[in-house]
Amino acid sequence: MTFPPLREELRGVEPYGAPQLDVPVCLNTNENPYGPSAACADDIAASVRAAATGLNRYPDREHVALREALAAYLAADTPHGVDPAQVWAANGSNEVMLQLLQAFGGPGRTAVSFAPTYSMYPEYARDTHTRWVAGRRADDFGLDLDVARALVEAERPHVVLLPSPNNPTGTALEPAAVADLCRIVGEQGLVVVDEAYGEFRRAGVPSALELLPEHRNLVVTRTMSKAFAAAGLRLGYLAADPAIVDAVRVVRLPYHLSAVTQAVALAALRHAPELLGNVAALRRERDDLVTWLREQGFEVADSDANFVLFGRFADRHAVWEALLARGVLVRETGPDGWLRVSVGTPEEMTAFRDALTVATKEA
């Protein structure tokens, strides 16, 4: 027996994570480059201090005030409103997804998605002993609804994971596709639309939140890591039928959201207009980047997120290394031959353009 006595399927597996390197221009983890203002930071600090005076007590296990604030925030994206009983939060959307697989996946159950997609999804399945099946997206990285229907009908999955916008491609889903898959899956399973980058979608692209009243098996997840410029907070959440929320409550760990996390999240929500104020600028920067990359002759996936997937390179790793040598870190992810770059400040994007122009000549 090899020590430690690890589960066999985990032997030799590397932990998930993008490189964390000390470089001048970090464009590999889709962070918001604009941090909170001094006023927001002061409110957060005061909120943490107030929470600290009660740290001898456990936090609100049901995080009621936070769920009320999140419901009020989400209501702006749907004409139907969102009730706090439909909302659940956890330590990042990663934990939200894991809780969903703990509650609705497991041995003898199947989860489905369509590649290329977020690389953590199969890990959630693995960690919960859920069978994993990955279909394929169309050549333009959109969802081929006929292919998706056929896979869902064949596999009868208990969980379907549909990021919109998709990571790493940035592709958004049509609401009709989501509704169709909800009907096909039926009440034997869930359709989870991961809107981690939802606030960055282009004008006219609706949120799946609008479909919640029609489909009780639909779950929409969000995060405060991206548009809210709060990646260090680790706060993700979902909106769904209250019965789904109650099921997730069964598998959550006791007091899983600390009093400090709840206090910081509530303070950030009080400053939502400010924290989201740079989203429009990042959208413009993204669209300008897509245009520039195409003018340089690259293939570029249409993006509704705060990142852009571009290619194709005969040796993408060589290009990645050439960019890194010039102080620009992007992500080597997605289909072979493609790279993903997060949208940064205008100064960061200028540095990226200059570095890429040289890197592609050298690689």
Image (cartoon, rainbow, N blue to C red):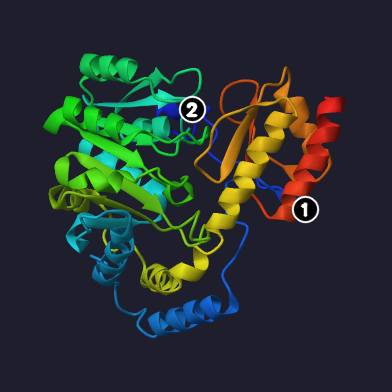
The type of residue carrying mark 1 is Pro
Q: Residue furthest front?
A: 204
Image vertical order of residue 39 relative to residue 204, above or below? below
Q: Which residue is mark 1?
A: 24
Residue 361 place in picture, x, y as percent: 86, 26
Q: Residue at image x 40%, y 84%?
A: 50
- Tag nearer the camera, 1 or 2: 1
Cβ–Cβ under 8 Å for marks 1 and 2: no
Report if residue 216 is visible in the image.
no
Q: Which residue is mark 2?
A: 11
Residue 86 place in picture, x, y as percent: 20, 55
Quadrant of the image containing the N terminus? top left
Q: Residue at image x 58%, y 74%?
A: 37
The type of residue carrying mark 2 is Arg
> From the viewer's perspective, is 58 left or right of 323?
left
Q: Relative to the observer, which residue lies in front, 53 or 39?
A: 39
In the figure, residue 159 lies in which quadrant?
top left
> From the viewer's perspective, is 189 left or right of 115?
left
